[in-house]
Structures are given as structure tokens and as C-alpha cells.
Amino acid sequence: MIKKISGVIVGYAIFVISSILLFQLSGKNPHQEVEIGFKIITLIYGAVFSIISGFVVQLIAKSKNLKLNYILAFIIAGFATFSLIKASGSHWTQLFAILIFAPISILGGFLYLKKQLGGNKI
């Protein structure tokens, strides 16, 4: 049980810390409108770190199914929804998190399980 909880916490931390770093290093405000090029970079960057987050959940938890990845996706989407409701300004980052990053984090778990199970029984 500790491994499962730790896996989800670490997976979420990877997602959040990578997001914070992107905006801190770029000097962009996630609640303001930005140029399309930066949105594309954010989309790719966020997708990669979402996959890594989902992969790490499984790496730590050693689960045999995707339940924990669904929990991670729910947490990512839940906090993004809360931010969407409470924050002012542009909401493009929250929409990316809800519609793209949360679901794609499940892919990270799928890739880990596929690797561990040799592509069978997923």
C-alpha cells in the first residue's frame, strides 16, 4: 500500500515540478495568453513529462494494472479543474492538463506494464 501511495505522489510531483520549471525558466505566466509556438512547446513538454509520471507510478508501485494511473490522471485533472475555476486570466494550461496531460499519463503506465509483461496480458 505504501508503494502505491508513494508511486502516485512521486508521479504527481514529477508532473508538477516539471511544469513549474518550464514556466520559471521560460519567464512565461501560465495564466496569461502566450504565442502559439510556446503552447506547442508546452504541449510536447507536458506530454513527455506526463508519460514519465505515469511510468514512474508503475515503476514504484509495481502494480499489475492501470488503476493507479487512472488515479494519477484523476488527480492531475482534479487540481487543474480546481485551478480553472479559481484562477483568473487565460486557462490554456488547465485545459491542456485536463484534456491532454491527465489522459496521456495513463500511457506511461501502459508502456511500463507492456515492457514488464512482454507485451502480453495488458
Image (cartoon, rainbow, N blue to C red):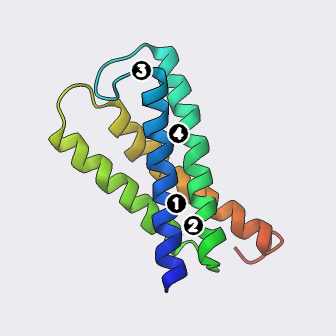
Q: Quadrant of residue 105?
A: bottom right
Near-viewer residue (25 or 94) = 25
Rendered location of residue 6, percent (x, y) = 50, 73
Labels 3 & 4 near each other (Cβ < 8 A):
no
Q: Find the distance from the CA under tag 3 to the CA under tag 4.
A: 16 Å
User: Would you say 95 lies left or right of 69 here?
Assistant: left
C-alpha gap between disc 1 and disc 4: 13 Å
Disc 3 secondary structure class = loop
Q: Earlier in the sequence, mark 2 or mark 3?
A: 3
The CA span between labels 4 and 2 is 16 Å
Residue furthest right as drawn: 118
Q: Which residue is mark 3?
A: 27
Secondary structure under badge 2? helix
As helix, strand or loop, the secondary structure at mark 4 comes to: helix
Point out the tag, 1 or 4, that comes first from the N-terminus: 1
Q: Amino acid at mark 2?
A: Val
Which of the numbered marks, if any, corresponds to residue 11?
Answer: 1
Q: Position of residue 46 (x, y in %)?
A: 53, 39
In-image side of 115 versus 72 (left or right): right
Which comes before the other along the chain, label 1 or label 3?
1
The image quadrant of residue 28 is: top left
Front in this rendered view, residue 65 or 46 = 46
Query: Which quarter of the rendering shows the C terminus?
Result: bottom right
Per the image, the residue denoted by label 2 is 57
